[in-house]
Amino acid sequence: MAESLEVEAARIPDRDRLLVLLREQGIEAHPIDEVGIEVPCDTEPGPACDELLTDVEGIVMDVGAPFVPIKHEGVIYVRPPVG
């Protein structure tokens, strides 16, 4: 059974940038709502849902964005660090 995982950015420009970066990595990603991205996972040849957080973390680190990806109840939130 195919599953999907939602990635939610803090702002629309952040969502758009992350969407492009995910697609450049070969990850099928589709925009939803204002700041969301839906990513199918646990299907071949796509990423497993558990591996997607690692992929998003790597992309955020590669671009040097000051954001922290956090997974909570099936959604990965990409937010500025607290503090």
Image (cartoon, rainbow, N blue to C red):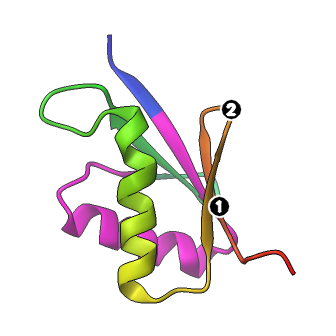
- Where's the N terminus, which quadrant? top left
Query: How far across and down, in percent of the image, does residue 9 sit?
Result: 62, 65
Q: Residue at x 60, y 33 (%)?
A: 74
Residue 27 part of the magenta-drawn span? yes
Q: Is residue 35 left or right of residue 81?
A: left
Graded by Cα atoms within 10 Å as few (under 14), some (14 to 19) or many (20 or more), the crowding at tag 1 reads: some
Reply yes or no: does residue 40 show up in magenta.
Answer: no
Q: Secondary structure at mark 1?
A: loop
Q: Residue at x 43, y 79 (%)?
A: 61
| Magenta residue span | 5-30
Q: Quadrant of residue 81?
A: bottom right
Residue of label 2: 73
Residue 11 lies in what quarter of the image?
Answer: bottom right
Q: Which marked residue is nearer to the observer: mark 2 or mark 1?
A: 2
Task: Find residue 26 and report its horizontal and vertical position in percent.
Answer: 17, 57
The residue at the point 43 percent across, 31 percent down is: 4
Q: Residue at x 72, y 77 (%)?
A: 80
Residue type marked 2: Glu
Residue 50 in the image: state x and y as whole percent. Answer: 42, 36
Tag 2–tag 1 contact (CB < 8 Å): no
Quick one: 35 or 66, which is closer to the camera? 66
The earlier-in-sequence mark between 2 and 1 is 1
Residue 63 screen position, x and y as percent: 39, 86
Residue behind mark 1: 34
The amino acid on which the numbered mark 1 sits, given as a three-letter code, is: Glu
Q: Is residue 42 above or below residue 12?
A: above
